[in-house]
Amino acid sequence: MIPLVHPCRAEGEKRFVTRLRYDDAEAEGRDSHLLMDTGNKMLFSGQHGLFEIEGTGKDSFDRDIVVVDPVKASAERLVRANSEHNTFLVTERCDQLCVMCSQPPKKHHTDRFEEYRQAAELAPFGAMLGISGGEPTLYKAELFDLVESTFASRPDVSWHILSNAQHFEMSDVERLCRPAFKRVTWGIPLYSTDPDVHDTIVAKQGAHTRLEESLALLMSSAAQIELRTVVLQSNAEHLPKIANFVARYLRFIVQWSIMQLENIGFAKNRFDILYFDHSSDFAPIARAIDMSTLFGVDAALFNFTLCSVPESYRSYCAASISDWKRKFAGRCNRCSGRNDCSGFFEWHPEGKMEVKPL
C-alpha cells in the first residue's frame, strides 16, 4: 500500500498547497524545490518556507501536489503526478447508509474545496481527477463552483464524480449543459430495477424513484454517466434485469461498471453474508454482460481478478483498483496476466485470495 499522508515538519502555522519539484528549471510561484534528499527524508523550500517530508523512500514525489499542515505535522499527497488514481474526498457526510459502504458516513464536514481547487490548477496536463464522499452533491453549490472555476483556468482537466444522484433538480439542467460539465463523468449507482431491493441496499426509502428522476435530468443535460452496480448476494440474480433496463432506457451511458464487493467499512463485519462468489456462479454476470454487449452497451468488471473469471469474459475485466491500495497474492508473481489484472484491495482477507496463475 502506498501511503498518501507522511510526517512533515514545516515552518509557519497555516496549511498550504504546493507542487513539489526536483528540478526548479520550470518552477512557478506555488512550487516548492527539493534542496536535499537523504533517502527517507526530503527537504523542500517554497514561498511558505522550509518543510521536511519523512517516509519518502524510493517513491517519486516529483510534481506531486501536497497539502502541508504545520500544526498536524503532516503532508498529504492530493495529486500524485505519476498516478492515474487521484481522488478528492470532498465530504464524509451522506444521506444513505448502503449496507456495503466502503466509506461509512460521518456527521461532521470539513470544507476543503479551496484546497482541491488549488490542487486541480496545479495538476499535470490532461489529468483526470476523481471526487468521492460521502455524498459530494450535499455540497452541490461548492462542487459545481469547483468544476467551473477549474475549467476557467484548466480546461484540460477532467472529473469523475461519484454521486448517489439524490439531489439533482430541474434548475440544475441549464448549468449542467455548460462546457465545464462536458469534462465531467458522473459515477451513479443502481443496485436493482426492483425499487424495494435497491432501497433496502441503500437504506433509504424512495431512493430508487429519486434516482430515476435524476437520471432523466442528467440525460436531458447530455451528461456523461457511468452506471455502477456492486454485486451482492441480494442482487446478483437481478443483474440481467438491470442489463435489460439499461438496454431499454439508458443506452446513452458511457459504461456500466459491475463491481465486486470491497471488504472494508460496513462490509467488513458482514462480508460472508454480502459477498457473492462469482467464481462459483458466474452465470448471472455472464447473462448481464451478454445482453449489454448485444445492445451496444459497454460493460466492465471492476475488482474481479482475471483468474476468477471465465476466459471468454476476461476481456471485460478492468485493472480498476487504485495503485495506492492494491495488492497481489504471492502466487500472482508467476501469472502472465498480472500487469492487466485488478489484483486485490489491500484489506482483502488473506484467506479469500484464491488465485490460479494464468
Image (spheres, helix red, strand yellow):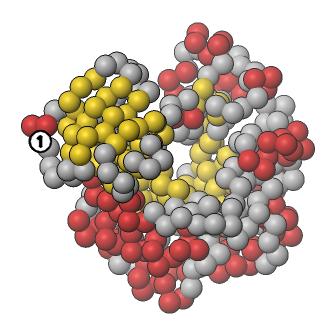
Total numbered badges shown on the rendered structure: 1
Quick one: which residue is furthest to the left in this view? 25
Q: Amino acid at mark 1?
A: Glu
Residue 52 percent location from the top left of the image: 33, 34
Q: Is residue 29 visible?
A: yes
Q: Nearer the viewer, residue 99 or 212?
A: 99
Quick one: which residue is furthest to the bottom in this view? 171
Residue 327 relative to residue 7: left or right: right
At numbered mark 1, what does the secondary structure look like: helix, strand or loop?
helix
Q: Is residue 77 visible?
A: no
Q: Quadrant of residue 164?
A: bottom right
Give the residue at x 53% y 74%: 139
Residue 247 relative to residue 296: left or right: right
Residue 119 relative to residue 310: left or right: left
Quick one: which residue is furthest to the right in this view? 273
Q: Nearer the viewer, residue 250 or 170?
A: 170
Residue 51 percent location from the top left of the image: 31, 39
Residue 257 percent location from the top left of the image: 61, 51
Give the residue at x 22% y 32%: 34
- Callout 1: few (<14), some (14-19), or many (20+) C-alpha neighbours within 10 Å? few
Residue 220 percent location from the top left of the image: 50, 80
Instruction: Give the quarter of the figure containing the C terminus.
Output: top right
Instruction: Give the quarter of the figure containing the N terminus.
Output: top right
Q: Quadrant of residue 39?
A: top left
In the rendered view, tell whether residue 282 sits above or below residue 28: above
Name the residue that disc number 1 marks. Answer: 26
Q: Nearer the viewer, residue 336 or 29?
A: 29
Residue 187 relative to residue 223: left or right: right
Give the residue at x 29% y 49%: 18
Give the residue at x 41% y 82%: 175
In the rendered view, tell whether residue 132 sits above or below residue 308: below
